[in-house]
Amino acid sequence: MHNPRTWILNLGGCLLSLATSSAWAFGEARGIDGFRVLDAARYQVFSERGIGAFNLIAQSNTLHNVCFFYATEKPFKRLEGITITQTTAKGDRKLTEFNVQNGCVEFEFREKENLPVQIEFVDMHR
């Protein structure tokens, strides 16, 4: 069994890194077991079920790359379905263009800073 104190310290470190990052924020999520920030524009998302959704809020319009994993050493082989929508400054939601390669998706934030992008994903090819 994991030591609760270690878990709390790790969670605190994750939250601190989220708070100090000026390039992005990870918002509400479902079907997500964990995530890892590789840098300001590259992320790993872990979902044992292979289906879920989450929000990202970026403060730059750089190209972002999200790779999906069932577990640490088990990446998605491919994404069966993915939808990326972004909220505009007027509150409208519009589809965002993206490129998919295997279990990774690459996209760019098209609207102004601090507006969320919702990523919904499905992979049933374990």
Image (spheres, rainbow, N blue to C red):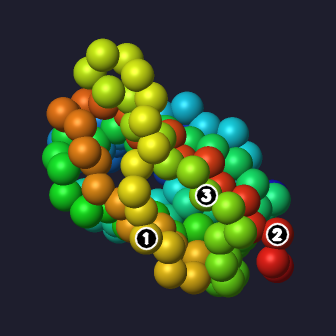
Q: Residue at x 43, y 36 (%)?
A: 94
Query: In the structure shown, which secondary structural element does the residue marked by tag 1 occupy?
Result: strand
Residue holding disc 1: 99
Crowding at dot 3, Cα within 10 Å, few <14 / some 14-19 / many 20+, comes out as some
Mark 3 sits on what residue?
Answer: 82
Residue 117 numbered mark, or none: none
Label 1 Cα neighbours within 10 Å, binned few <14 / some 14-19 / many ≥20? few
Tell me if I can see residue 26 in this picture. no
Ranked by sequence position, the earlier of labels 1 and 3 is 3
Of badges 1 and 2, nearer the viewer stands 1
Q: Residue at x 37, y 17 (%)?
A: 91
Can you say which quadrant of the picture contains the C terminus? bottom right
For the residues labelled 3 and 2, the Cα–Cα distance comes to 12 Å
Which dot marks residue 124?
A: 2
Instruction: Give me the C-alpha separation between circle 1 and circle 3.
Output: 10 Å
Residue 102, x across and y down, in percent: 57, 82
On screen, residue 45 above or below 88: below
Q: Amino acid at mark 1?
A: Asn
| Location of residue 13 in the rendering, given as x and y in whole percent from the top left corner | 40, 47
Q: Secondary structure at mark 3?
A: strand
Placement of the N terminus among the 4 image quadrants: bottom right
When the figure is inspected, residue 85 is found, relative to residue 106, above or below; the finding is: above
Measured from the top left, where is residue 79 in percent x and y? Answer: 65, 71
Q: Residues within 10 Å of mark 2 (few under 14, many from 20)?
A: few
Q: Are marks 1 and 3 in contact (CB under 8 Å)?
A: no
Q: Is residue 98 visible?
A: yes
Mark toward the start of the polypeptide (3 vs 2):
3
